[in-house]
Image (cartoon, rainbow, N blue to C red):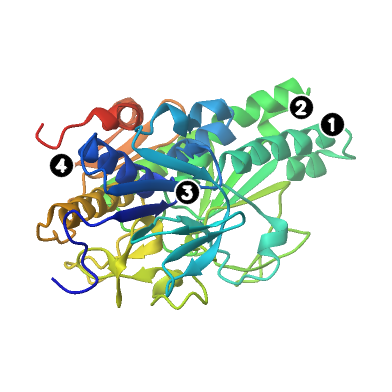
């Protein structure tokens, strides 16, 4: 046991920064394990919001199929009594003094969990941040829907049908799961918005673009084919091998020189690490994600665990970092909780191991695609599976504090 390792019975302050998928599940599991034991251990969760956002449901909010309130889980309803919640904006780190810095006070820790999530990655594309909306919070989703309604309202007074069609076109950059789900949701909603404004629904248009050769990169060919077919049936125009060179008032200018014009532009082209990590001294890799050891501790800082989108964890089979998905974040949150409790109990740490449960993507309000247990399915069944997964996740958040390590 080295000098950085916690000793059983020693006073400890565990601070978890971020109430996203990884951070929330780490604190819920720790609270359940600690219960009324280990009075020497303090457990604090810090986040700027007093709610947890279910980010995988944001496309439904942006498409008007789900109220924003439905994808916010108030933390007071799920946190164990052992957990102290601090609502504050995190501003930095004092690693030497072992303090998490916030806009209010510095919070001391003996163990720190960084689960700060990520932010949209514009890849340095000129004009993109100014021209396009993002979809990375409940407020973002609301802005997308409001922007579409505003553009459709303005199309009523447009001079001709061509200008009406431009304003009624939504361009989505990035054809990963978020982009595909958003395109599917909007494909059903745009005609109804057009009718409410007295416009021709046939003028509503969705263009989904991606720099790569396929949508849903990394998925099986069967799943990609099914997803393409559903999008085609919904009237979504898919353009792959379409890398954006810059964004202007006219639209997305591609490397080919073509310009994709529209009324609303949404960027779902990838994520990068929280800006707080830059310049922090933590070792970082691709997209600013923090490099960790096999136990999910930051390299050279064993008192700092990292989980979720912020952690750069290598898949031993591919040699690439695991993607920043909710499924990966939940698995990392569990490993962090397990290892923190192991330190408290004086047991060996467990290395992180990830077993993918598959991929499920909804495409519109009634259809979807999925790769599960080596099988590819599509249509209504895949959509029902997506709904079931979301329901199960909500239940796990609400009831995990009663979860027993023995059970």
Q: Which residue is mark 2?
A: 199
Dot placed on the residue nearer the N-terminal end, 1 or 3: 3
The kind of secondary structure element at disc 3 is strand
Q: Position of residue 97 (x, y in %)?
A: 44, 71
Cα–Cα span, label 3 and label 4: 37 Å
Front-lying residue, 221 or 78: 78
Dot placed on the residue nearer the N-terminal end, 3 or 2: 3
Cα–Cα span, label 4 and label 2: 45 Å
Decide: marks 4, 2 in contact (CB < 8 A)? no
The answer to whether residue 365 is above or below residue 181 is: above
Cα–Cα span, label 1 and label 3: 46 Å
Decide: marks 1, 2 in contact (CB < 8 A)? yes
Q: Which residue is mark 4?
A: 373
Give the crowd class for mark 2: few <14, some 14-19, many >=20 residues within 10 Å. many
Single out the mark in the foreground, 3 or 2: 3
The kind of secondary structure element at disc 1 is loop
Single out the mark in the foreground, 4 or 2: 4
Q: Is residue 216 visible?
A: no
């Amino acid at each position: 046991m080295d000098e950085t390792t916690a000793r059983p019975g020693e006073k400890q302050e565990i601070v978890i920064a971020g109430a996203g998928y990884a951070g929330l599940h780490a604190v819920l599991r720790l609270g359940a394990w600690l219960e009324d034991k280990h009075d020497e251990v303090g457990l604090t969760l810090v986040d700027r919001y007093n709610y947890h956002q279910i980010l995988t449901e944001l496309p439904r909010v942006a498409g008007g199929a789900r109220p924003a309130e439905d994808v916010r889980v108030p933390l007071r309803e799920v946190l164990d009594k052992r957990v102290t919640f601090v609502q504050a904006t995190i501003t930095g780190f004092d690693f030497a003094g072992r303090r998490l810095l916030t806009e209010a006070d510095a919070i001391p820790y003996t163990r720190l969990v960084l689960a700060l999530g990520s932010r949209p990655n514009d890849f340095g594309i000129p004009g993109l941040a100014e021209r396009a909306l993002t979809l990375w919070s409940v407020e973002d989703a609301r802005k997308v829907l409001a922007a579409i309604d505003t553009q459709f309202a303005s199309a009523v007074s447009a001079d001709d049908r061509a200008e009406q069609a431009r304003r009624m076109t939504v361009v989505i950059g990035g054809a990963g799961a978020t982009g595909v789900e958003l395109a599917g949701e909007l494909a059903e909603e745009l005609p109804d918005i057009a009718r409410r404004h007295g416009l021709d629904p046939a003028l509503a248009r969705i263009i989904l673009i991606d720099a790569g050769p396929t949508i849903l990169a990394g998925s099986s060919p069967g799943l990609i084919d099914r997803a393409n077919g559903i999008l085609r049936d919904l009237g979504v125009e898919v353009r792959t091998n379409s890398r954006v060179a810059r964004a202007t008032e006219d639209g997305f200018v591609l490397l080919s020189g073509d310009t994709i014009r529209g009324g609303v532009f949404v960027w779902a082209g990838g994520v990068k690490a929280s800006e707080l990590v830059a310049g922090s001294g933590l070792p970082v890799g691709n997209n600013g994600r923090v490099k960790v050891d096999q136990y999910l501790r930051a390299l050279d800082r064993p008192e700092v665990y990292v989980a979720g989108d912020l952690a750069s964890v290598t898949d031993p089979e591919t040699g690439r970092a695991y993607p920043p998905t909710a499924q990966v974040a939940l698995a990392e949150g569990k490993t962090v909780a397990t290892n923190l409790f192991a330190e408290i109990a004086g047991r060996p740490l467990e290395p992180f191991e990830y077993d993918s449960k598959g991929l499920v993507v909804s495409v519109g309000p009634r259809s979807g695609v999925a790769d599960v247990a080596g099988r590819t399915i599509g249509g209504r069944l895949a959509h029902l599976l997506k709904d079931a997964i979301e329901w199960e996740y909500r239940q796990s958040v609400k009831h995990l504090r009663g979860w027993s390590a023995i059970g």
